[in-house]
Image: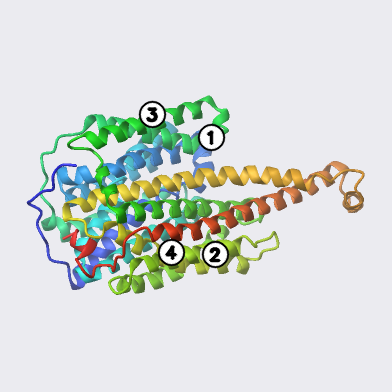
């Protein structure tokens, strides 16, 4: 990337009511952004029906946002240097509000998809810049607390999204999943501008890396569409998916080669020369991919096979926020006093324990059985983001924080997309395998099968109805066994990732050399 600016101005941290207001404003903007990645998922049937299209066409409402967002996130570092951190953040928030309002007003699926593309594109810089501005708001010794406030919104929003989206769609109407962004965004923008307008870094006249940008759009766009549509089109049995992955692979190879030799790259890949940065970013990305795959899997299983409504499934997952909210400030306050790697280890170990607990689920699991691991998972979430981001950003100079944060977030978001696609596909494939094994002995020659069919028919069912009911039971058991397989595999993966954390060097939060907080001032 371009040489660091020598004109970076060090601003004193905020204090008192200003610090509280700044934290709330930036966290609200982040929450609104992350919420929008999942809030529309449960509303697709209602949107499709209202706009007169098939549910398959309706899923482009999700894909369009994801593609545009994935492309714009890694551009944040360059854009922040070009226009200034505060100006870019304010522009992103206000444009996000505008396109959210237009999404709600969209009269057709084409219009809605277009506005979702624009919404995703302007949303990209919001998360990394909110992180940057929060770090600049707190004194160095409280940088962990800044990350604690940021992590709460980032981890809780994906869980709240489907619950809130389902409730709004059921009780009001789907446009309101977009309209709710308008008041939140305007208040957050107003508060942010009043506090931060005099704390902006001056923009610089940087040359645009047009080739790098074009390659980024090409490979990220192709990859994101392939991941979103792969399951629907049967993955590599589809020539479209094969072509998209081929384009993504070639585009990625050319992108890496170009960015490593470009004098002013659009994405600063030299960050990966830092051991702590690549170890932490890789850990947080892989762990988030596994985490997000499970965030998608659990409510799907509850709704499709356990008889939960979208709202009930959301309520069963909501307790995850309790310990996450209660413990995050504690973790943030302790970051300067202990090695961050130990905190990350606790997070990954607890995630592993939670997923092992879920791997013992069966179809008789009641709501308490579902909620207990979810409650414990809140402990892992409190210890997850804060130490890993601390390790990644530790010791970076001020002008590199936006680029480092945006690249870290880009890899995390992309891993989340991989996790969603991989888990939903494996769940179906393992379910089909378990279904086949469970039905191997179900034949007229099997005594148990005959007795079961006879009992159902004596209860008044026809042979066809009896077979259908029995098949539903087998489907339910197969789905449960498949989910248990994935829960157990996830548990093992989280434990394995502990080793990756310890490839990073020791970091004691904002103690010592000033660490990441120094990089934000």
Q: Which mark is residue 381?
A: 4
Report x, y in % for residue 134.
24, 61
Sort mark 1 into few (<14), some (14-19) or many (20+) by Cα contacts within 10 Å.
few
Judging by the rendered image, the residue that carries numbered circle 1 is: 56
Q: Nearer the viewer, residue 154 or 186?
A: 154
| 161 to the left or right of 23 | right
Calculate the distance from the C-alpha at mark 4 to the C-alpha at mark 2. 11 Å
Q: Secondary structure at mark 4?
A: helix
x, y percent for residue 463 = 88, 43
Q: Is residue 298 visible?
A: yes
Q: Which residue corresponds to mark 2? A: 354
Q: Are marks 3 and 4 in contact (CB under 8 Å)?
A: no
Spatial CA distance of label 4 from label 1 is 33 Å
Cα separation between marks 3 and 4: 36 Å
Q: Which residue is drawn at the image coordinates 19% and 59% (left, top)?
A: 520
Q: Position of residue 472 (x, y in %)?
A: 75, 48
CB contact under 8 Å: marks 4 and 2: no
Residue 69 in the image: above or below residue 346: above
The earlier-in-sequence mark between 3 and 1 is 1
Residue on which disc 3 sits = 250
Q: Can the viewer see residue 180?
A: no
Front disc: 2 or 3 = 3
- The 10 Å Cα crowd at callout 3, few under 14, some 14 to 19, many 20 or more, is few
As drawn, the residue found furthest toward the left would be 7
């Amino acid at each position: 990337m371009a040489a660091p600016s020598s004109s970076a101005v060090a601003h004193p941290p905020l204090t008192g009511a200003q610090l509280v207001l700044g934290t709330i404003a930036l966290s609200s903007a982040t929450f609104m952004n992350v919420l929008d990645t999942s809030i529309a998922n449960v509303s697709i049937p209602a949107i499709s029906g209202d706009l007169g299209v098939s549910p398959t066409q309706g899923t482009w409402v999700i894909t369009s946002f994801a593609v545009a967002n994935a492309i714009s996130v890694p551009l944040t570092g360059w854009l922040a240097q070009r226009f200034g951190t505060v100006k870019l953040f304010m522009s992103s928030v206000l444009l996000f509000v505008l396109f959210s309002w237009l999404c709600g007003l969209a009269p057709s699926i084409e219009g809605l998809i277009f506005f979702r593309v624009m919404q995703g594109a302007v949303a990209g810089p919001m998360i990394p810049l909110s992180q940057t501005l929060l770090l600049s708001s707190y004194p160095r010794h409280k940088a962990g607390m800044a990350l604690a406030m940021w992590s709460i919104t980032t981890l809780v929003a994906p869980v709240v999204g489907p619950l809130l989206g389902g409730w709004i769609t059921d009780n009001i109407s789907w446009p309101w999943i977009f309209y709710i962004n308008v008041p939140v965004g305007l208040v957050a923008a107003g508060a942010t501008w009043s506090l931060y307008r005099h704390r902006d870094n001056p923009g610089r006249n940087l040359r645009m890396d047009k080739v790098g940008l074009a390659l980024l759009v090409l490979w990220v766009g192709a990859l994101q569409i392939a991941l979103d549509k792969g399951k629907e089109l049967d993955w590599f049995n589809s020539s479209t998916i094969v072509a998209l992955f081929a384009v993504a692979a070639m585009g990625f190879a050319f992108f890496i080669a170009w960015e490593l030799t470009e004098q002013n790259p659009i994405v600063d890949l030299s960050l990966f020369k830092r051991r702590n940065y690549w170890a932490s970013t890789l850990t947080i990305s892989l762990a988030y991919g596994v985490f997000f795959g499970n965030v998608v899997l659990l409510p799907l299983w509850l709704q499709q096979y356990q008889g939960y409504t979208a709202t009930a499934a959301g309520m069963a997952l909501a307790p995850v926020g309790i310990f996450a909210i209660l413990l995050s400030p504690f973790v943030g306050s302790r970051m300067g006093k202990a090695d961050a790697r130990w905190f990350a280890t606790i997070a990954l170990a607890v995630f592993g324990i939670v997923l092992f607990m879920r791997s013992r689920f069966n179809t008789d699991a009641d709501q308490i059985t579902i909620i207990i691991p979810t409650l414990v998972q809140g402990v892992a979430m409190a210890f997850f983001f804060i130490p890993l981001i601390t390790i990644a950003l530790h010791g970076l100079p001020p002008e590199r924080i936006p680029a480092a944060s945006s690249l870290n977030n880009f890899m995390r978001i992309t891993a989340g997309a991989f996790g969603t696609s991989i888990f939903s596909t494996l769940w179906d494939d393992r379910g089909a395998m378990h279904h086949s094994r469970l039905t191997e002995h179900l034949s007229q020659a099997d005594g148990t099968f005959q007795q079961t069919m006879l009992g159902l028919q004596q209860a008044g069912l026809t042979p066809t109805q009896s077979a259908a009911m029995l098949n539903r039971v087998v489907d339910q058991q197969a789905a449960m066994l498949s989910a248990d397989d994935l829960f157990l595999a996830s548990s093992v993966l989280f434990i394995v990732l502990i080793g990756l954390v310890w490839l990073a060097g020791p970091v004691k939060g904002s103690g010592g050399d000033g660490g990441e907080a120094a990089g934000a001032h």
